[in-house]
Amino acid sequence: MLILVALADTLENLVRDYLAAPASVDLVELRLDSLKETDLRPLFEAKGKPRIATCRSRAQGGFFGGNEEQRQQVLRQAITLSVEFVDLEFESDDEKILGQTLTSRPILSYHHRGGTPLDLESIYGRMASRAPSAILKLIPFADACTDNLRVRDLLRQARTEGRDLIAFCMGDRGKVSRILARAWGSWGVYAPAKSEATTAPGQLLLSELVDLFREKVLQETTPLTGVLGHPVSGSLSPLLYNRAYQSLGIEGCFLPFDAEVVAEFLPLLSELPITGLAVTHPHKESLASHCDELDPTAAAVGAVNTVVRRWNRLVGYNTDGEGAVRALSRVMDLQGVRAGILGTGGAATAVALGLKLSGAKATLFGRNPQRADVAARRAGCVAEAWEGASRFHGDVLINATPVGMAHISAESPVSWSQVHAEVAFDLVYNPPLTPFLQEARNAGARILGGAAMFLEQAVSQFEFLAGREAPRELFEEIVSPYVVRGEA
């Protein structure tokens, strides 16, 4: 079941949202915990999709501000008015209502925002024994990527037992389980039509589930690709790839894999039908060590931004340097250019090597001298202490750190007060105009945002992951709102 979440603070607005449920939706969850009115009859007299009545207290992660007796009275009123389903919280006073549900089928819910409990399977067993005829709903918070697999395994168990179970994970790391929930056998998955109706962390919008990820057609065997990083919530890759798959008629789904360390992602790589990955910060170097084979560029820089599974072997590629050179060459001649690069990670090393091969002279600025020396040797350039970046004199200064990225920081990695460079290039593309670029523009430099590089590397990357030529015009259309370039 695809369940629309409807949340409003007035009965009029809730009725409006209920009646506006699109054809793609099977059920509507009416969140009654924000309502000011107490007479629910107009809501249940309206004719539309089948409904779930939900009223959660603040302690349960909801919005109801009254006492428990008042909250349960709301649920009882919905049952009396013949709501099709009623959501009751496990191990709470709601269980007193289990035997009073009349024609309303109960959904016995368990939500755990403090992570995925170690005894998740035991909780499921207790719920099943407590309410044999109810739909069970277990929604833990994903602490790690592997929690998605625990939920999948629980859904498999419920399937073998013939039991209706709703299960997926909250949080950014749990988005994978939301998208694949019904493919894994979940009785339903929830999504609001608008962001202001979001009721849980990591909840995807209805348009994302239906139009972008096409969750209704996904199966356990559907080929999967995705972006691996931390964080990945601001990545354009899922939009880019899923739109491209649809336009070219390619079977598959491109997912956001959020993992703080590569180790927590490896079980998913083993157990899910993942055919390839786009790799971003901070995993470009660590995932390279798990590849069975590296192309010459990836081997040279010791980092990958693309991994493809071939005959159960992982092959790593790096299109970062190529993408940066193509983007930068559109605004300046690279022959003999003096470039400064902030950072010593996989992206910085790849860009430095790409510039060297294009006739430029690059200097890497890093906080860790040993790491900087290793990166410089790989790229065939020189390394200097981080403090030297703030006094850089050259042609282009490039930010290859995540500083300035949305959800990471809102500052520039260096001050431009003593920097002298003709061009500032930031590999970060979200936000499009970063603090680094703002300071550079104020200092009189021309600026180039990271979307230009993202586009160029993605065009090359797509051929590795999809085995088809990238639809460049479509990519340019999607990326265009993020493109920043111009004079001071």
Image (tube, helix red, strand yellow):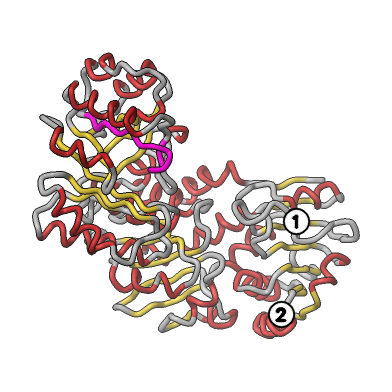
From mark 1 to mark 2, how far is it between C-alphas? 20 Å
Vertical position of residue 57 compared to residue 139: above or below: above
Q: Give the range drawn in magenta.
A: 51-62
Alpha-carbon neighbours of circle 2 within 10 Å: few (<14), some, or many (≥20)? Answer: many
Vertical position of residue 215 compared to residue 380: above or below: above
Q: Does the magenta stretch include residue 487?
A: no
Look at 25% across and 52% down and name the residue there.
218
Q: In this view, does 350 lie to the left or right of 37?
A: right
Look at 50% across and 52% down and name the residue there.
233
Q: Can you identify the residue that label 2 sits on?
A: 372
Q: Which amino acid does label 1 sit on?
A: Ser
Horizontal and vertical percent position of residue 435: 74, 50
Tell which residue pokes out farthest to the right in this image.
Answer: 418
Q: In which quarter of the image is the C terminus?
A: top right
Q: What residue type is labelled 2?
A: Ala
Horizontal and vertical percent position of residue 434: 70, 50
Alpha-carbon neighbours of circle 1 within 10 Å: few (<14), some, or many (≥20)? Answer: some
Q: Can you identify the residue that label 1 sits on?
A: 412
Horizontal and vertical percent position of residue 177: 32, 55
Name the element at disc 2.
Answer: helix
Q: Does the magenta stretch include residue 61?
A: yes
Q: In which quarter of the image is the N terminus?
A: top left
Vertical position of residue 92 compared to residue 319: above or below: above
